[in-house]
Image (tube, grey):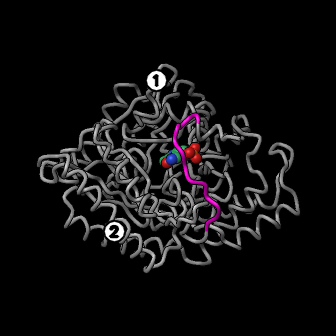
């Protein structure tokens, strides 16, 4: 009997075996149908089984599937780099291809450190991040992440990089206005930079909207302008981690477009290949690359599969598909429709505390008391209950943490494929409301309100 090491012994949990997917739907061996309401881990952005992508795979496979990055380039990789430079904001024109979001953020970190070295400054080696954050699972990426659960086992081996609060108005606003909150966050960043010393910090990294560690936590329009001004004042590069939010997910091609700030480096992945292949990229500005070109002329990073032609061709086909079918616009439109429907549910619900997000990147936070915003106790594991109840109803939703300590809050992300139609959104909402009602009933039996 063969067993998947990755699944059974490690997780001790039995997952259904998927046989195929079609559009927003997945089907398992038992014939059960699921709506991929989370696009997996916010990844399958164009849905499953798309023929154009299958054709592009076959076409590239007939040409060449692998060449090594420091021996050859390919048309597929060159065209993908060109496409990214066209769709990325400002002068973010240079792409370094990797295979996962973790590699993309870790490469961004290394490029930022190397940038300062090329300028003769060798002390700028730390990266400042937010405590509610997740930038990846490899050691460098995890060092920049605040995600408590994912860090805890490896804490002794991780760098203790400086960190600041995330913009979490739902809990932080209290008597403050959003503007006052933003001033507080910017002030905190400045204080932390002064404490650590500007000469020790290469970059500030932030998810435009926080995913796994926040549940689509969304800043105000001004937040990033204030944070970037502080970075500029102290010669600190700004890295936007758009691994989850990039490529149309939030109703703009890149989420930073909502906030009027052009980063020095963008890390992206997930939706970039919509899950059809492992592919991610670190997109770098002219200003940063100029330092490399006039310096050591090499970016000290890279993986065997970097710029893999097969993956590049698939990712390019995904980007064309997104453009051809106006999926960024559909994300904005269907996202607003879905958010409206969830807000209607929230009015009737006793446990929805906050509905947030943009486009098809929506977060729902659950609380025990809507007035005091008191979170449920950890033991109740409300996030898992919500995820499981939805799973039973045939709707996949993505679990997320919420809470400035990175542990206390319960939240989920709704992020169906950008191809979703209005009728399909209605079905998502129907399944979600059944699951929600189930969990509410279960909890009211256990809690004395
Ligand atoms: N950054 C962000 C914002 C993410 O959401 C993730 C994945 N959840 C990563 C980085 C890491 O990406 P990967 O899992 O592809 O390594």
Q: Residues within 10 Å of mark 2 (few under 14, many from 20)?
A: many
Q: Residue 229, can we see it?
A: no
Quarter of the figure with residue 68: top right
Marker disc for residue 390: none
Specify whether residue 127 is painted magenta.
no
Above or below, 60 relative to 369 = below
Task: Give the residue pinned by disc 1.
Answer: 155
Specify whether residue 13 is painted magenta.
yes
- x, y (%) of residue 306? 73, 46
Name the one closer to the observer, 231 or 274: 274
- x, y (%) of residue 377? 24, 39
Residue beneath the point at 72% across and 34% down:
296
Q: Is mark 1 within 8 Å of ligand 1?
A: no
Residue at the bottom extreme?
Answer: 423
Quarter of the figure with residue 347: bottom left
Q: Which residues are magenta?
A: 9-21
Q: Residue 340, can we see it?
A: yes
Mark positioned earlier in the residue sequence (2 or 1): 1
Is residue 38 left or right of 29 when viewed as pictured?
Answer: left
Residue beneath the point at 41% across and 70% down:
428
Residue beneath the point at 34% across and 31% down:
192
Q: Is mark 2 within 8 Å of ligand 1?
A: no
- x, y (%) of residue 30? 58, 61
Q: Quadrant of the N terminus?
A: top right
Q: Residues within 10 Å of mark 1 (few under 14, many from 20)?
A: some
Residue beneath the point at 43% across and 47% down:
212
Q: Helix, strand, or loop for circle 2?
A: helix
Task: Give the residue pinned by disc 2.
Answer: 339
Name the one closer to the observer, 123 or 424: 424
Q: Helix, strand, or loop for circle 1?
A: helix
């Amino acid at each position: 009997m063969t067993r998947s090491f990755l699944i059974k012994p490690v997780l001790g949990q039995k997952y259904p075996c998927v046989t195929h997917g079609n559009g927003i739907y997945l089907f398992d061996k038992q014939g059960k149908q699921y709506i991929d309401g989370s696009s997996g881990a916010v990844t399958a952005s164009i849905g499953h089984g798309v023929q154009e992508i299958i054709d592009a795979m076959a076409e590239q496979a007939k040409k060449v599937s692998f060449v090594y990055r420091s021996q050859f380039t390919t048309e597929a990789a060159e065209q993908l780099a060109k496409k990214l430079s066209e769709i990325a904001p400002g002068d973010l024109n240079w792409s370094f291809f990797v295979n996962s979001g973790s590699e993309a953020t870790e490469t961004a970190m290394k490029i930022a450190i190397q940038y300062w070295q090329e300028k003769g400054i060798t002390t700028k080696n730390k990266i400042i991040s937010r405590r509610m954050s997740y930038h990846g699972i490899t050691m460098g990426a995890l060092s920049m992440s605040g995600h408590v659960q994912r860090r805890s086992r490896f804490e002794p081996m991780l760098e203790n990089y400086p960190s600041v609060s995330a913009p979490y108005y739902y809990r932080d606003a209290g008597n403050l206005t959003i503007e006052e909150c933003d001033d507080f966050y910017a002030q905190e960043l400045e204080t932390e930079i002064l404490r650590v010393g500007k000469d020790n910090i290469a970059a500030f990294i932030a998810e435009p909207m926080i995913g796994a560690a926040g549940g689509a936590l969304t800043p105000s329009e001004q937040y990033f302008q204030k944070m970037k001004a502080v970075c500029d004042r102290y010669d600190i590069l700004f890295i936007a981690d758009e691994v989850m939010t990039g490529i149309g997910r939030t109703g703009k091609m890149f989420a930073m477009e909502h906030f009027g700030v052009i980063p020095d480096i963008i890390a992206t992945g997930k939706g970039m290949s919509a899950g059809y292949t492992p592919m991610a990229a670190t997109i770098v500005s002219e200003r940063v690359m100029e330092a490399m070109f006039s310096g050591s002329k090499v970016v000290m990073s890279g993986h065997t599969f970097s710029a893999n032609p097969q993956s590049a061709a698939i990712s390019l086909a995904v980007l064309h598909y997104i453009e051809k079918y106006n999926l960024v616009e559909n994300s904005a439109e269907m996202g607003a429709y879905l958010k409206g429907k969830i807000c209607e549910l929230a009015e009737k619900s006793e446990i929805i505390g906050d509905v947030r997000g943009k486009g098809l990147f929506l977060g729902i936070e659950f609380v025990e008391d809507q007035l005091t915003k008191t979170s449920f106790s950890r033991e109740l594991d409300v996030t898992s209950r919500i995820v499981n109840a939805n799973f039973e109803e045939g709707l996949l939703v993505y679990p997320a943490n919420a809470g400035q300590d990175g542990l206390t809050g319960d939240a989920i992300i709704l992020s169906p494929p950008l191809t979703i139609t209005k009728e399909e959104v209605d079905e998502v909402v129907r399944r979600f409301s059944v699951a929600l009602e189930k969990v509410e009933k279960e909890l009211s039996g256990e809690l004395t309100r």
